[in-house]
Each structure stands twice: as structure tokens, then as C-alpha cells.
Image (cartoon, rainbow, N blue to C red):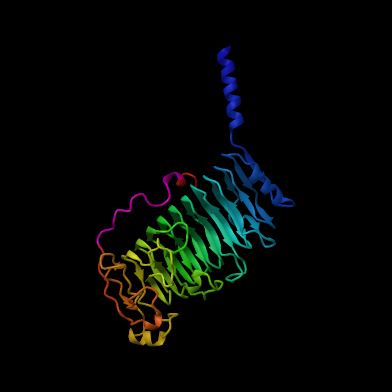
Amino acid sequence: MIRTVISTLALLSASSLAAATHEVAAGAGAQERLQEALILAEPGDEIVLGAGRFAISDGLSLDVDNVTVRGAGMEATVLDFTGQRDAGEGLLVTSDGVTLRNFALENPKGDGIKSKGADDIVYHRIRVTWTNGPAATNGAYGIYPVESTGILVDACEVSGASDAGIYVGQSKKITVRDSIATDNVAGIEIENSRDAIVERNFVTRNTGGILVFDLPGLPVMGGGNVILKQNLVVGNKTANFAPPGNIVAGVRRGTGIMVMANEKVWISDNIVRDNPTASFIIAAYTKPFDDARYNPFPREVVIAENDVDEGSTDPQLDGAEQLLAGFGGALPPIMWDGLNQDKDNPALLATPEISSWTLNLTRQGQPLAEAQPGPGDLPAYGQPWEFGEIGAPERLFDRI
């Protein structure tokens, strides 16, 4: 009898702790019902969004650990923020262990989904679209994890962001893979972050394809240990539509892959074609800064074997006609500003199979008007270095 009672109590206890499912259907009052579910969820719960369009007029938020929010598909379940009145983003996540999957956001007034301080987060088959196409009035970022450890962005789609479609900032242990970024200023940006893999993404019709930046004045700096591989970076020709003053407003139309002030970036096995300013741009930070922690120079960037075209024939550069004439009608695929931190820390190493040119600048912040363009002569690279534990933790892949 005692054993029976104990077993019954154990079952009751387990039942009370079992994860709950909160189903939310589209229709009248959907915004209130969805936000209520996000607030009342307990760790381990699942919030299931039905198919249909959810009219949302205010930002949503989630601050409960280990919650899954899933829809019926990124074309079937759409959170429509066209009538959003305020809030900096469509959905803000500030808790750990969250999985977001199979739904879309359209026309958020600010960013699409921002996760801040949200460790071990998974974005899977999430779509963020500004349906009016490229416009400075669109939100800055589509998928926007920041200040986090453990990030997986998988099979997502973003278009129309006035900064970066997929942006990962001030974070570490990151994988961005199998995703599509079109019609943004920057397709994918990894900024002030470490231990990132960006692979098998399709990046097209942006101003610039993939950016790896390190900037001064942010709480987290020292970006590096980044692998870019097997991405398709083609036809990034959209005129820059970033609001004035934004750092990406300086990205030239027709940039394929750009690395600025980062260390240990390995670029291989990508297809980088039809980007009319340059397939690759490697450069130091150009503006004045007073942050003593900051290193403005790229260090140990490797451009290994990649599939590139013959060169750039329509660069958005001052003196383009003279440059094209000087290089026989096409600029070599690799453009380097010529700046190294010092002789022991080369900015750039590359395969001899891809030609290069340099601006031959001699100091950080030097005006481009003082450039002395000429053919590049880059040192060869050796074997890949030991990256250590890089990319999203394996446990995140079990949640897709």
C-alpha cells in the first residue's frame, strides 16, 4: 500500500511539472492572447501559433527560459506588424534556452526579432520580411541576437533590412547556416563576436554580402576566430539605402565579403561572383577613435580557395574609370587597403590563385584621396590554425 501511494504521488508530481502547450490562433484578440501566453509560459512550455495572419500593433516580449515558440511554417504563420505603433522590435527575447521556429514577421517598425542576453537560442525557419523592399524607413535588423553565448540561426530568410538582414553582435559560439539574405544593406553581419561559423548561406541582391566587423566603443570587442565557408555570395548590387550615419552606410554597392578590423578570419570554398565593386575587401577601421581597448587593424585574414569571377568591372569607387583602365578593364577580386598592424601580424594572406590589388595606404584613417593603387603581393597562407571550440554548441542542433 505504501509503495502504491508513493507511486501515485510521484505521478501527480510529474504531471504538475509536465510542460504545457499554449495554442494561439489567429483572429480577433490574437495579439493579447499571444502576449499573455508569452508571459504565462513556464520553463519547458511550448507556444503553438496556428496558421494565418496575426495583426500585431505593439512589440511582443518573452522572458522565460527554455520556451519554444513555433508556428505552422514561415509562409503559413505570419505576425503582421504593418500597423505597429511603437516598440524597438517585433519580438524581444531576454531569456535563455529559447527555440523560435516556423513562423514569420512582416513589416516590424524596428528590428524583427531581437534576443539580448539570451544564451543558447535557436532560430529555425524564421522569416523576416519588409514587404515594400529596400527602404531606409525599414527596421535595422531582421534577426538580431546580441550579447549572448550559443546562437544557432538555421534555414532562416530575411529581406529588406536597412542595416543587416542577419546580424550577430557582441556574442560568441555562433553558427549561421543554410539561410537566405536578400535586399538588405548587409546580408549577414558578424560584429564584435568570436567563434563563429557562417556556412552554406545564399546571399544576394544586398548592398554587401557578408560583413565581419569589429568596432570601437562597444561593451564587447575583440572579434575574431570566424570561418566563412561554402556560401553563395552573388549579385549584391543594390544601392546602399542605410540611414545616414549608420556604419554600414559606408559599404560600397557591389561588395561580396568584407572584413574590417577583425582577427583570424578564414574564408574558403565560397562562390563569390558578380559583386561589381569587389569580391573581397579587407580593411582597417577608417574613423578616429579614443577607445584604448580597440585594435583597428585586420590580422591574419586568410582568403583560401574560393570560386570567383575575373574581377570587378563596375566598382563604386572614386576614380573608377582610371582604376579600370589601369588594371586592364577589371579590378582583381581581392581589394586590400594595404594596412598591417605590424610586420609580425599580417593583415591578409591569400591563395596565389586569386589576384589582388592594394590601395597602399600607410596609416589608419588616411584619406582615400591619398591612396596609391597598385597590384597586390600577398603572402601565402599555411594550414588552417586550430580554431578550438567554434560555432554553436552541439546541444542546440538537437532542437531543430
- At 52% from the left and 66% from the top, the residue drawn is 182
Residue 96 to residue 75: above or below: above
Image quadrant holding the N terminus, namely top right
- Residue stretch in magenta: 382-395
Q: Nearer the viewer, residue 295 or 399?
A: 295
Residue 128 to residue 399: above or below: below
The image shows residue 71 at horizontal and vertical percentages of 60, 50
Q: Quadrant of residue 296?
A: bottom left
In the image, is 198 to the left or to the right of 373? right
Residue 244 to residue 225: above or below: below
The image shows residue 149 at horizontal and vertical percentages of 46, 49
Q: Nearer the viewer, residue 149 or 124?
A: 149
Q: Is residue 288 magenta?
A: no
Q: Is residue 206 visible?
A: no
Q: Count the marks.
A: 0
- At 65% from the left and 51% from the top, the residue drawn is 51
In the image, is 370 to the left or to the right of 115? left
- At 52% from the left and 74% from the top, the residue drawn is 240
Residue 82 to residue 10: above or below: below
- At 50% from the left and 60% from the top, the residue drawn is 167
- Secondary structure that dominates the magenta span: loop
Q: Quadrant of residue 42?
A: top right
Q: Is residue 389 magenta?
A: yes
